[in-house]
Image (cartoon, rainbow, N blue to C red):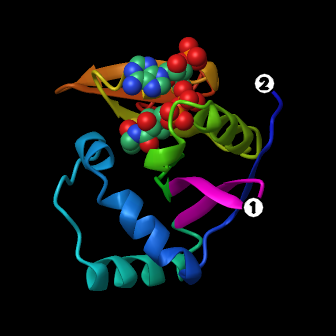
Amino acid sequence: MTDRVSLRPAEMKDAETLFIWRNDPATREASHNQDVIGLDAHIKWLSSSLNKPDLRLLWIAEMDGVAVGTCRADRLENAWELSWTVAPEARGKGFAHQMLSKLVRGFDEPLVAQVKAGNIASMKLAERAGFALDKQEHGVLFYVYPNTFSMAD
Ligand SMILES: CC(C)(COP(=O)(O)OP(=O)(O)OC[C@H]1O[C@@H](n2cnc3c(N)ncnc32)[C@H](O)[C@@H]1OP(=O)(O)O)[C@@H](O)C(=O)NCCC(=O)NCCS
């Protein structure tokens, strides 16, 4: 498939789109915090996230100028932790794979990702993007990139 998804940094103007995606049932099901988030709390979260780029990075994936997904990287001590969501209406079209592969190629530091066991699409995505399974704990799979990295490092 032609790689047509582009990535740009998220901005405050993306607040409503990110809010809708965050409260989508499948997104909540895949998240540690499954609560429905209120708009005020979401706007505060986005604003504070955009103000600490040394600790958190947020991207919007676009297809022909339309937002189709988002990725987040959270700073850990020795790696960045990635998470991802595709717009509900844009799922199942290969956008997640393009978005994640592009993002991974742009990093020069180790990456980790937590995927709930049973989230088959995300397990496939992580593996196709080059992540390796490091460990499984309490129903959560911990993936690492590159495959020589371990969370115990
Ligand atoms: C998980 C998610 C990002 C996948 O996005 P997507 O754009 O549908 O993914 P893709 O189309 O790139 O498909 C990725 C792979 O998963 C497979 N897949 C997609 N949906 C699937 C499903 N419901 N069940 C099983 N496999 C599925 C695809 O066939 C593809 O596999 P392939 O590489 O063998 O062809 C999207 O469903 C989503 O945002 N879900 C809610 C939030 C979430 O789960 N985030 C991840 C938390 S770790």
Kindly identify which residue carries mark 2.
1
Residue 113 in view here: no
Local secondary structure at mark 1: loop
* Depth order, front residue of 11/115: 11
List x then y, in percent, for residue 129.
Answer: 64, 26
Q: Which residues are magenta?
A: 56-73
102 left or right, relative to 125: right
Residue 79: mark in rendering: none
Magenta portion: prevailing SS class: strand
Residue 60's x, y, as percent?
A: 62, 60
Q: Is residue 61 above or below residue 20?
A: above
Q: Residue at x 61, y 70 (%)?
A: 10
Question: Are circles 1 and 2 on residues that touch, CB within 8 Å?
Answer: no
Q: Is residue 59 toward the left or the right of residue 114 in the image? A: right
Image quadrant in which the N terminus is located? top right
Residue denoted by label 1: 65
Q: Amino acid at mark 1?
A: Gly
